[in-house]
Image: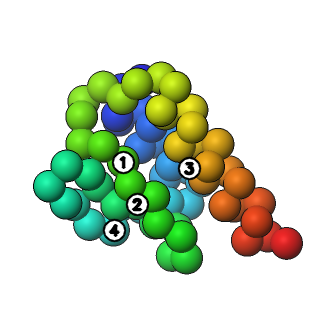
């Protein structure tokens, strides 16, 4: 998956770029953070795992 596509999905879920590190970017929704690798292409399985993890964090915070 292209990194830009993953970033767009994160933005739709209310996440934004907090800071950039050496190898990762740190994204947040204001409460939780999630590191994303700094590559143009992100492995499909890793992208799905990140989205699943973020969805879990969203649902956890709603309860």
Earlier in the chain: of badge 4 and badge 3, it is 3
Q: Secondary structure at mark 4?
A: strand
Q: Circle 4 is placed at which residue position?
A: 18
Which label lies toward us, 3 or 1?
1
At x 24% / y 34%, what residue is drawn?
39
Q: Position of residue 44 (x, y in %)?
A: 47, 23
Crowding near pointer 3: few (<14 within 10 Å), some, many (20+)?
Answer: few
Q: Secondary structure at mark 1?
A: strand
Disc 4 from disc 2: Cα separation: 5 Å
**The C terminus is located in which quarter?**
bottom right
Earlier in the chain: of badge 2 and badge 1, it is 2
Q: Where 11 falls versus 62 (above or below)?
A: above
Earlier in the chain: of badge 3 and badge 1, it is 3
Which label lies toward us, 4 or 3?
4
Disc 3 from disc 2: Cα separation: 13 Å
Which label lies toward us, 3 or 2?
2
Q: Circle 2 is placed at which residue position?
A: 27
Q: Position of residue 50 (x, y in %)?
A: 53, 43
Crowding near pointer 1: few (<14 within 10 Å), some, many (20+)?
Answer: many
Callout 2–callout 1 Cβ contact below 8 Å? yes
Disc 2 from disc 1: Cα separation: 7 Å
Q: Circle 3 is placed at which residue position?
A: 12
Q: Position of residue 29 (x, y in %)?
A: 52, 68
Q: Circle 1 is placed at which residue position?
A: 36
């Amino acid at each position: 998956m292209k990194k830009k596509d993953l970033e767009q999905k994160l933005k739709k879920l209310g996440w934004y770029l907090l800071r950039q590190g050496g190898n990762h970017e740190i994204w947040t929704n204001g409460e939780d953070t999630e590191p994303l690798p700094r590559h143009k292409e992100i492995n499909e399985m890793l992208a799905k795992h990140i989205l699943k993890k973020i969805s879990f964090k969203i649902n956890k915070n709603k309860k």
